[in-house]
Image (cartoon, rainbow, N blue to C red):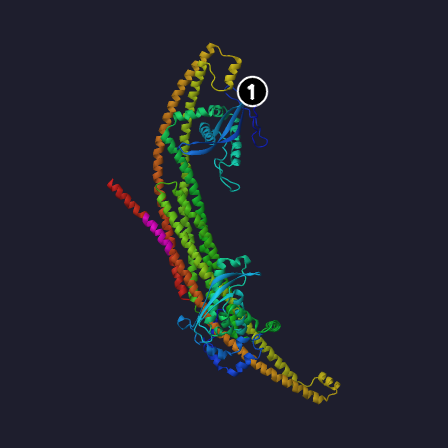
Amino acid sequence: MSRTIDDVVSPTQTNTIPADISGQMLDLDEDDDFEVFSKDSTLADGSMFNASMQTSPGSMVNQCKFEEDEDGDSKDIFITVDNPESHVTAIETFITYRVLTKTTRSEFDNSEYEVRRRYQDFHWLKGKLEEAHSTLIVHPLPEKFVVKGMVERFNGDFIETRRKALHKFLNRIADHPILSCSEDFKVFLSAQAWELTTYKKQGPGFLSRMGETVRAVANSVRGVKNRPEEFTAIQEYVEDFSNKISSLDKVTQRIVKEQKEYLEELKEYGPTYTLWSGSEEELAEQLKGVAGCIERCCQETEEQVGHLSDTLVPVLHEYVLCAETLKAVLRRRDNIQAEFEAKNEALATKKVDRDAESSDLGFVWGSLLGKNPEEARHQRQERLDGEIEELKVEIDKLEDRVEWANNALKGDWVRWQRSMRGDLKSAFLSTAEKNVDYYEKCLAVWETFLLSQRTEPSEETDRDNTS
Amino acid sequence: MSYQMPQPKSLPGKSYFILFTLRYLLRKMEISVGEAEKRTGKNSVNMQEIYTVYLIETRPVDAVTEGLIPAPDSLWRRYSEFELLRNYLLVTYPFVVVAPLPEKRAEIVWHKLSADNMDPDFVERRRVGLENFLLRLASHPVLCNDKIFYIFLTEADSRLKAMNAAFRVKNPDKRFTELKHYSDELQTVVSQLLRVQARVADRLYGVYKVHGNYGRVFSEWSAIEKEMGDGLQSAGHHMDAYAASVDDILEEEEHYADQLKEYLFYTEALRAVCRKHELTQFELEMAAQDLTSKKQQKEELVTGTVRTFSLKGMTSKLFGQETAEQREAKLQVLEQQIEEGEEAVKEKNTESNEFVKTAWVDIERFKDQKDRDLKEALISYAIMQISRCKKGIQVWTNAKECFNKM
């Protein structure tokens, strides 16, 4: 139970891909890939490839950087999402965000792009990326709907939170060695609004997509039989991680709530001392001093709560969504394998069929039609042989697909774990730092007050001495 | 002229006519607190104030049964005068369970609109309460015979005011009145402070304790992580420590609250001293008023004029003057009483002055003690906050180091 995924996915295994997946990619024969990915529609997990997969993974990767660069020095694409604006049409009101791209990548015609996008567009992009790379881990989008109700959609805080999440979403894709090479991604960043609408309309029609979805569901119902150990381990981890991160999300939101209620009471507390000072003579100064300290601590508390809401809460929430993404990715991988297994089983059945003695029914049927039983059997065997050969070809392709999917996932899994660790570590660090800062500021406030009190007795003794 | 006795809105089943015996001229008397009015005037610290006065009407039952319905004797009194009367009765008849007065302030407010003593509903309820109070006194076998009570019911306001003006001792009165205001204010503000402080402490408790959940979840999470495990585990311990630290903090807050509470209770003692002063003052004023009334009676007797409309005056008009001997006898009694009265007034005056002097010495002592004690309390409060901040810095610095190891 406590065995971690790292134990299973060790660098010594020959099947695993190192952090940059590119090495594996280049091993594939380019021509085969071109065939596989542009003509054959069955190799995605139930959905058609569109224009984004015209180029093979190998050739795509050639255009992309192989190395994972976390630092900004060798980053060649910078994206910002900002400037939310409200758009009112006859039918609806929605928010658009400005997406600003600066890049030196060769596949982009310009070095700078400025477009406006709405949430729907981001959602479309995510869908396209997941279609094309079903076992890569795409960073989650902020939620589509707010649980509390639609009125909240246009609340300032909600828009700002969403904007930040969208910004992160695009940057994560930009950082990803494979996803950032996606044609859909490029179009998203560079096309004008009407161009994008046209582009979106390409691709498989509704009915064919439905058909693929049905197949996917059928596969998932069937289930996978021989899942490799490492993916089971990943799945178990994801289950646990999902629980823990959800708990942390809830705990943090509860802390924010309690802090806000504390702040409300604190706001009443200070003025009471001020009120009291109005009735006193000697004590008035001190009472006002205490009131002042409390009020300043109120300000610090407000800042601290704000920081928590802005920094830790969104990150935890993102990873709650990530956990769901991971579960979906694992499911899709399973489906790919399930499809392969299903075809294998079909092959085995066909082989048994072919190798079996001619069945009575076939013989009877053949004789009814006036065929020579010997000829009938021969025809049948030929037919089955043909089918078997076709199946074998399909199975080969599916096997490749499974292997590719597995490797993609394994590589991306390592990558994801690293970013998860980085993100959560920095969020918690930032929170701890802010809390230290908060207490230090409050400490200074009270120490100043205390100093002002302590000096007074010495003044009094001076007066006594001189009187 | 016709006069309609106002019906008080008393509780059902309560008799409007209370019978009691009176040592003096009348056997039975009707009492009611009929109306309420607003007055403005200058109070003892020379500030403008608005207050409510209540109309006390009395009428002998006899007059009604004899077919006469004379206008009732009436006078206006305000709540504080009722208080004086009650305090006097408390002291004079210590064995008697004296009926209570209605609320001084609108303390318990139903609709949270205002705790306003000027609110008409409040005034009306108070009027009923005051009438009830008087009727209780009047129906008490011992209290109903009290002379001061009788004077309270029947002697006109203007006379009382005049007496006050002649015999008031100016500065001490002001100081005691200020002291009473101060003690009321202190009670109100410290009560409020303690209430808010309790709420703040309660909320703070919530914040700290929820962090304990971090401890639990971090610990569970660390079990499934490899590189992050150690950092998370130790961070979790610090979160537990943080959550636990609030218990000590709240204990210190309680200690501080106790120091404030002591002074909250002290206000009661302050008020008791002010009450005693009011009482001695009241006795002095009553004695003075009695004296003046006697002097006036003497004057009436001598000159044959009737100053105020009273039953006595009417009866003498209706049934003729007394004989010269009767008048002479009465005069002698009165002169004796006047002499005694003057002695009494002198005595009360001295008593009052003595009280004021000694009381004020102790009040000054108390004030110094209070200032010292509360100053110390505030300093210790600041020290408490500093300690809490230091603990917070330590915990979160440690947690930060653990997060760094993640």
Q: Please indicate, yes or no, whether residue A149 appears anywhere in the rendered image.
A: no
Marker count (numbered): 1
Q: Is residue A107 above or below residue A284?
A: below
Residue receiving disc 1: B63
Q: Is residue A221 above or below residue A150?
A: below
Is residue B139 left or right of A366 when viewed as pictured?
left
Q: Is residue A450 magenta?
A: yes
Q: Please indicate, yes or no, whether residue A118 appears anywhere in the rendered image.
A: yes
Element under label 1?
helix
Q: Is residue A426 magenta?
A: no
The residue sitting at the left extreme is A466
Q: Which residues are magenta?
A: A440-452
Give percent across and percent down for residue B383: 36, 50
Task: Identify the residue at horizontal 34%, vertical 49% (top origin).
Answer: A449
Quarter of the image where the C terminus of chain A is located: top left
Give percent across and percent down for residue A401: 54, 78
Task: Identify the residue at horizontal 37%, vertical 55% (top origin).
Answer: A441
In front of the other: B71 or A206: A206
User: To which quarter of the image does residue A150 belong?
Assistant: bottom right
At label 1, counting other C-alpha atoms closer than 10 Å, the crowd grade (few under 14, some 14-19, many 20 or more) is some
In front of the other: A173 or A277: A173
Q: Amino acid at mark 1?
A: Ala
Name the subunit of mark 1. B
Q: Is residue A320 above or below residue A399?
A: above
Give percent across and percent down for residue B298: 43, 16
Q: Magenta part mainly helix, strand or loop?
A: helix
Give percent across and percent down for residue A409: 50, 74
